[in-house]
Amino acid sequence: MKNESRKQWLSYLATADENYLISLWDNLNMKIEYNWLREPEIGSVMVQGKAGVTGDNFNVGEVTITRCSLSLDKKIQGHGYVQGRNKYKSKIAALCDALMQTEKKEIIKRNIIDKLIKYKNNKRNEILSKTEATKVDFFTLVRGEDK
């Protein structure tokens, strides 16, 4: 992630394992002053799926989310939208989002975002290797009927 966009880092923060994200944040031991624009609140959103490539969208169901917004020095805003009911995780996501827009960007990138990327890739590779171990190759035999 050389030129990270806000969309990318928000995605990593939103989908991060909550215990891992909280431990990364707590290890930084940063004391950040901020003002709430919207305190953490729990709600739900409708998730949509799509039938095939060209099919119509359909509602899969609702997913619980927690969201919040804050500002640093009334200039920089940070937003945290996370799946589940963890207000602290949404606060951390909002703080990281805001700090990624400041001079502390490299600290957050190196100590949180990069580690989240590595963690997610390791989890993906672990799942792929388990899947590969159960892969079955099918083949067709040609019947040897001579006429």
Image (tube, rainbow, N blue to C red):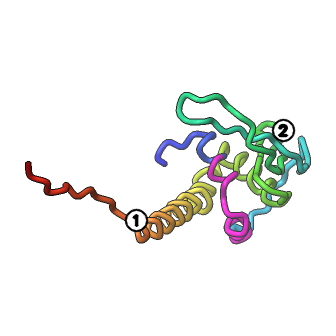
Residue 135: assigned label: 1
Q: Which residues are magenta?
A: 11-27
Q: Residues within 10 Å of mark 2 (few under 14, many from 20)?
A: few
Sequence-first tag of 2 and 1: 2
| SS at mark 1 in the image | loop
Foreground residue, 90 or 123?
123
The overriding secondary structure of the stretch rendered in magenta is helix
Q: Is residue 130 above or below residue 51?
A: below
**In magenta stretch: residue 24:** yes
Q: Is residue 66 left or right of residue 52?
A: right
Q: Which residue is mark 2?
A: 74
Q: Residue at x 74, y 53 (%)?
A: 93
Q: Is residue 34 above or below residue 135?
A: above
| Total numbered labels placed on residues in the image | 2
Which three-letter amino acid code belongs to the residue tagged 1?
Answer: Lys
Across and down, in percent, residue 119 comes to 55, 65
Foreground residue, 74 or 65?
65
Foreground residue, 133 or 38?
133
| SS at mark 2 in the image | loop
Point out the residue furthest to the left here.
Answer: 147
Q: Nearer the viewer, mark 2 or mark 1?
A: 1
Q: Is residue 85 left or right of residue 1?
A: right
Which three-letter amino acid code belongs to the residue tagged 2?
Answer: Lys
Q: Residue at x 85, y 50 (%)?
A: 34
Q: Residues within 10 Å of mark 1 (few under 14, many from 20)?
A: few
Q: CA distance from mark 2 to mark 1?
A: 54 Å
Across and down, in percent, residue 19 comes to 72, 69
Foreground residue, 76 or 115?
115
**In magenta stretch: residue 86:** no
Across and down, in percent, residue 38 comes to 90, 43
